[in-house]
Amino acid sequence: MAENSDKTFYITTPIYYVNDIPHIGHTYTTIIADAISRFKKMDGYDVFFLTGTDEHGQKVEKSAAEKSMTPIELADKVVMRFKDLWKALNIDYDYFIRTTELLHEKGVQKIFKSLQRQGDIYKGDYQGHYCVSDEYYLPEDVPLEKDGSKICPDCGKKAIILKEESYFFRLSAYEKKLLDFYAENPEFVRPQSRMNEVVSFVKSGLRDLSITRTTVKWGIPVLEDTDHSVYVWFDALHNYVTGLGYDWNLGLFVRFWPADVHLIGKDILRFHAVFWPAFLMAAGFDLPKCVYGHGWWLKDETKMSKSKGNVLDPQVILNTFGSDSLRYFLLREIPIGLDGNFSHEGFIHRVNSDLANDLGNLVQRTMTMIQNYFGGTITEMDKAEKEDKKLAKEFKAVKTKIHQYYEDYSLNKALEEIWSYINTINKYLADNEPWKLAKNEENRGRLGRILYQAACALRVIGYFVYPVMPDSADKIWTFLGENKSPAGQCFSELQFDQFKPKQKTRKPEILFPRVDLKEFLKEEEKEKTMATINFNEFKKMDLRVAHILEAEKVEGTDKLLKLKVDLSTEQRQLVAGVAQEYAPEELVGKKIAIIVNLEPVVIRGVESQGMVLAAEVGGKAVFAFYPDDVPAGSKVV
Ligand code: MSP
């Protein structure tokens, strides 16, 4: 919206590890970033929003090996999951950086080399607690046992002490510079309580940082000393400059650097508020303006973890509720800095009460009345009375507050304020009872006025919720007959009465259907059991390409076809419920995928020795056909 603006804004999320699929924690940071970025655009800023994936390191190497994949194959697969999820959640990022991109790798190597040349990086020996079975150094924060050893949190075995050659970053030289910087920039770490944590960590003394490993092969090699690869954090943190064009699009880099805000979870604060500014100081780059550490989401008051099996899959929630409900809940429930608790009861309560009742009903009622009483266009209205003007008057104060809250990243407060205004509008309708006025033709002018006021108020509500709920906001504006999105209007230009009196409105649809908790939990359980087979279970399925030799209808049925297929080593007979989609002669000669090792079943007296794979589209089956040159019997993996 504001590409020519002289106000720029650069916002980032952490880059996510690819050894696991996206969960609610990743979703949370990314939604916050998206909402802030959308608000900033509405506020006239030229925004750059960066997210991406952190793909190197031992954990990824190990995860890939467990899945019989190469690290890059695993990364490619998980990146797709992230990108699909961001699409489903309406995340409008500008660039998705992957640390395996050549441009990133080259940028990191270049910075490494120049710090090495100037003496900020030097070679020494690294000694740490090394888990032989998992082949990695335990993180520094794994606590020491009484005998001074450490136990591997993954396998539970005792780690050995191992020493290897390593490059070090001279972090100790930056202690004073960092403390001076924090003192001059008290807003650098937010919330304030986290700044105190950071300052006391630095004051307690900084040791030089080991930033390479010879034991890890899946990483960026150090130039001219390729036995060493760059350790994940030195690699990962630099995504914030390489993803912005450092060393490949300097125009972009110069325009947006330094970052206005790095959004992160509180667990990775030290890396961002201590190590990262020190790396940047050494490289001579400006420092980011703010590192914002958000809280953690717990599930039913406990930490989520794979072993407890209580990790929330955002996709399951999205499938039932759509993206806006999840975005709203996560941003409304807690201030960004605090921990939050996710319970299904709490979530569904919010969806039903705030979204379905307060906002959804208001939109539905107002738009339906305009349709029913005026055919969609308010053609008549009296002058505004004193109480009608109250909504407009209150709007001014509400707009200022919402602007301040969004600007301060107090998204929950902005939403509270919006909901309080929604309640005012609901009360205005309840007090004026337009549905009663509609019974008498004489009241038409008054009725028109009330509905006009409500439509104006809905237009600004649509505008205010846009950063958090872009889909619903667009819909509200479409119902009102607007031909643009709220994104196309500048915050400072928003007025109460911009809904045009003679504007043709459209029939509304339900924005947020009410949800029944029990039904939802049942659905979720179903999806969970479907979603959790492991790779070995998957490998048990024998999927093959089958060549259809014969096809005919199963006698006495409308839907079933009997197929004779060739698998090169043998022939099979199958029954498939596709007679309404495909004529038998269409299928003969085609190559399809079937599951071979499914127990045979008898359907309408005919034995089916396997099952055909098909997509289900609107209740109809659609086959995927392989090209002629794919041999029958080929494995499908
Ligand atoms: N790859 C590093 C970040 C490198 S940034 C240069 C990393 N990745 S991560 O995938 O493990 O975590 C990414 C983010 O998810 C972190 O900010 C972390 O705080 C956040 N969350 C993980 N679980 C979370 C919750 N349960 N709740 C909220 N956020 C949490 O760390």
Image (tube, helix red, strand yellow):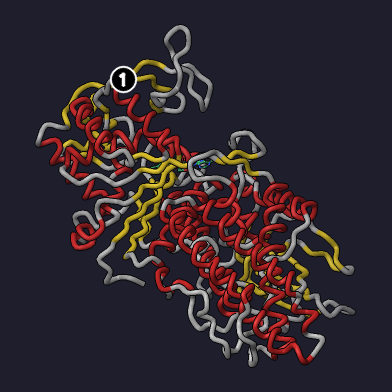
The vertical placement of 363 against 582, above or below, is above
Question: Quick one: 181 or 590, which is closer to the camera?
Answer: 181
Image quarter of residue 556: bottom right
Q: Is residue 220 toward the left or the right of residue 434 in the image? A: left
Location of residue 298 in the rendering, given as x and y in whole percent from the top left corner: 60, 38
Q: Is residue 462 toward the left or the right of residue 216 in the image? A: right
The vertical placement of 29 against 360, above or below, is above
In terms of secondary structure, where does tag 1 sit?
Answer: loop
Image quarter of residue 254: bottom left
Look at the image and tell me whether residue 181 can be seen.
yes
Which residue is found at the position 67% from the left and 50% from the top? Answer: 347
Counting other residues with Cα less than 10 Å from the Cα at mark 1, is it few (<14), some (14-19), or many (20 or more)?
A: few
Which residue is found at the position 42% from the left and 51% from the top? Answer: 408
Question: Quick one: 17 or 182, which is closer to the camera?
Answer: 182
Residue at the spot of label 1: 204
The vertical placement of 284 against 95, above or below, is above
Q: Amino acid at mark 1?
A: Ser
Location of residue 179 in the rendering, given as x and y in whole percent from the top left corner: 25, 30
Which residue is found at the position 52% from the left and 48% from the top? Answer: 21
Which residue is found at the position 30% from the left and 33% from the top? Answer: 274
Quarter of the figure with the N terminus: bottom left
